[in-house]
Amino acid sequence: MLEKIFKLKEHGTSVRTEIVAGVTTFMTMAYILAVNPSVLSDAGMDPTAILLATCIATFIGTACMALTANLPFAVSSGMGLNAFFAYTIVQLGGYSWQTALLAVFAEGVIFIIFSLTGVREAIFNCIPLMLKHSVSVGIGLFICFIGLQNSGLSADADTLVSLIDFKEHFHTAGICALLALIGTVGMAVLYIRKVPGSILIGIFGTWALGIICELTGIYTPDADAGYQTLIPTFTATDFSKLGETFGKCFETDLNEVGIVNFIVIVCSFMFVDLFDTIGSLIGVSAKAGVLDENGRLPAIKPALMADAAATTAGAVLGTSTTTTFVESASGVGAGGKTGLTSMTTAVLFLLSMFFAPIFIAIPSFATAPALILVGFLMFSSVGELKFSEENYTQVIPAYLCIIAMPLFYSISEGIALGVISYVVINLTCGKRKEIKPVMYVLAVLFIIKYIFL
C-alpha cells in the first residue's frame, strides 16, 4: 500500500529511510510546540489550546502535503508569522486575538483560491528577488530580538535597550538570563555539529539546567514577580481547553474592527505568508533535488494548497498562520524523498497532543534560544543581497525593509517601507522598467494605510 501511495521505488527510497527522515524532521521542528504557545499566549490565548490547535493543524497540513503533493515537507505554525500575530496585530495594533484569527482564516480561504488559480505563484514572481530575501532576513532579526527580550538578556535602559545586569535580582531574572545565554551557545554547538533535534535538545537542556538551579537554591521562584517554579507537574492533557479557541474567529464583530482595518490586517498576513511559504518551498525543494530544469517545483500547486488548507483549519482551531517549515530540509538530508516522510512527521505531531502539559510548562528563557537560533537561520539569506553600486536601487529598499522590522518592532512596517522605497527609488532613478505592475499596487495600498489608518 505504501509503495502504491508514495511510489517509493520510483524515488529510490525505502520505508525505513522515509520513516527515519520523518522522525528527523519532527525532532528538528518540534520546538514549535514549546515556542508557539509561549508566543501566542502573549496575545491572551490559552497555552494548552494553542498547543492542541498547533498539533492538529500541523497534522492536517503535513498529511495533505504527503497525500496530494507526495513531498517530504512539513507544515506548521510559522515562526515570524506567530510573532506578527501576537506582537504586531494584537499588542501593537490593539485588535483582539479573535479578530487576528478571523484574518488568518480569511487569508487561508483567499490562498486556497489563489493556489487553485495560479495567482499565488504569479504574485510571487512579480516581487523583486532581493526584496524577497530581505523579508526573511528582517523577520530573522525580529525573531531574535523577541528571543533576547523573552530571555531577559535585553533590558530597558536610557539607551532604549541594554544587556541585563546579571547581579541584580540574580536568583530570578539574572539566573534566567544567564541560563538563556548558556542555552543559546549550547544549542548553536549542537546545531553546528549536526546533532539531530539540536533545537529541541537545547530547549529541554536549558530547562533541565533551570530545574537543577531551583533544586540547589540558585533559582528562587517568585510568583508575584512572574517567576514560577520550573519543576513540571505531570498531568493528563486537558483536551477541553481546545474549546477556548475553537471557532472563536467567527465571534469577531467586523463593525467594531472596521472593514478597511480588517482588509489591511488580512493583506498584511497574506504578504508576510507569501514570502515565508514560497521561500521555504523553493529552498527545501532545491535541497531535495525536486526542482525542474527551469528551477520550478512541479508539484507546487498541491503543496500550496496543503499550506492554505492548514492555515484555514488552524484559524478555526486557534493557531496562527501555517507555513512550510525550512527545517524539513533536515529530513531531506536524512534521505527523505516522498510523502511518507511528511506523513511520519504528521503522525508524530498528532501524538504530541498527549504530552501537552510538558511542552506548556517550558519557561520562556528555555525557548528563547530557539528564537535566537531560528532568527539566525532566517538571517542567513542576507548573503543573497548583492551590495554593489549597480544594485543600489534593489539593495537599499531591501536594507530599509530589514532594519525597520526589529527597530519598529513590526514585520508589516518593514515590508511596507521596503515596497514603497523600492517603487520610489526605482522611479526617480530612471529604472521604471524594473517595476512590475503589482509593486505599484502594493505601494499605493501601503501609502493609503499610512494616510487613513
Image (cartoon, rainbow, N blue to C red):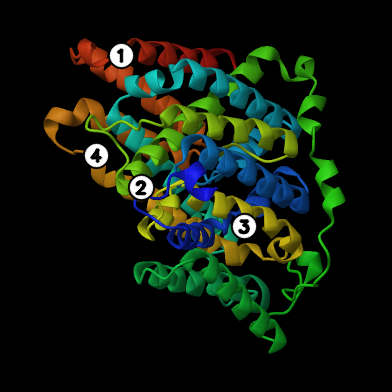
Q: Quadrant of the C terminus?
A: top right
Amino acid at circle 4: Leu
Instruction: Please give the residue where the numbered disc 1 appears in the rendered image.
Output: 436
Which numbered disc covers residue 11? 2
Distance from disc 2 to disc 4, alpha carbons, whole Å, reads 35 Å
Give the label, 4 or 3, closer to the camera.
3
The answer to whether residue 26 is seen in the rendering is yes
Give the label, 3 or 1, closer to the camera.
3
Residue 73 appears at what percent x and percent y?
47, 45
* Quadrant of residue 373 within the rendered picture: bottom left
Instruction: Please give the residue where the numbered disc 4 appears in the rendered image.
Output: 385
Of mark 2 and mark 3, the one earlier in the sequence is 2
Does 135 appear above or below 119?
below
Instruction: Please give the residue where the numbered disc 3 appears in the rendered image.
Output: 348
Residue 101 appears at what percent x and percent y?
69, 32
Mark 1, Cα crowd under 10 Å, few <14 / some 14-19 / many 20+, is some
Amino acid at circle 3: Leu
